[in-house]
Amino acid sequence: MYSEKVLDHFKNPRNVGELENPDGEGSVGNPVCGDVMTIYIKVNDDRIEDIKFKTFGCGAAIATSSMTTELAKGKTLDEALEISKANVADALDGLPPIKMHCSNLAADALHEAIKNYKEKKG
């Protein structure tokens, strides 16, 4: 049902935790499945220098959060805004159709964190 990459990112998630005084923070949730995630970013010279996440949810939600942080780290804000639900699912070698909504959340949380950073910056 799950790819090896999904299982790896679920069992050994990357970039878990909170950043102290993040430059941007994005939280999203899906009340239907109960998944809630927050992504924190540190930005330096328009590039995501550091990124962390906290997720309450199923294995797919944790795996997509982990993969999203991996995809975004080191990217410019514009490049990170291009990360889509399909990119996340592809990077994990696919997700079961019933779990695709989880990857939507991870990309959305990233986009919200960038939006929050830009709003703070003015």
Image (tube, rainbow, N blue to C red):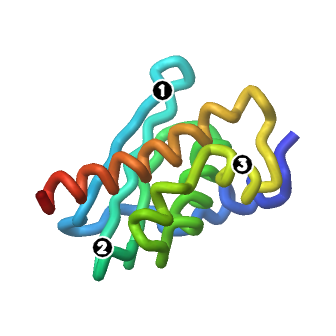
Q: Where is residue 6 in the image (x, y as percent from the top left)?
A: 74, 53
Which residue is painted at 80% across and 35% down in the image? Answer: 96
Element at badge 1? strand
109 and 115: which is toward the camera: 115
Q: Mark 1 points at which residue?
A: 30
Residue neighbourhood size for the residue with mark 3, other residues' Cα within 10 Å, grouped as few (<14), some (14–19), many (≥20): many
The numbered disc on residue 43 is: 2
> Residue beneath label 3, please?
89
In front here: 15 or 88?
A: 88
Which callout, 3 or 1, points at the residue further toward the start of the chain? 1
| Amino acid carrying mark 2 in the image | Val
Judged by depth in the image, the label closer to the viewer, 3 or 1, is 3
Q: Rounded to the nearest whole Å, what is the CA distance between mark 1 and mark 2? A: 27 Å
* Farthest right residue in view: 1
- Checking the image for residue 9, the label placed there is none
Q: In which quarter of the image is the N terminus?
A: top right
> Circles 2 and 3: CB distance less than 8 Å?
no
Disc 3 marks which amino acid? Ala
Mark 2, secondary structure of its residue: strand
Image quadrant of residue 20? bottom left
Residue furthest to the top in view is 32
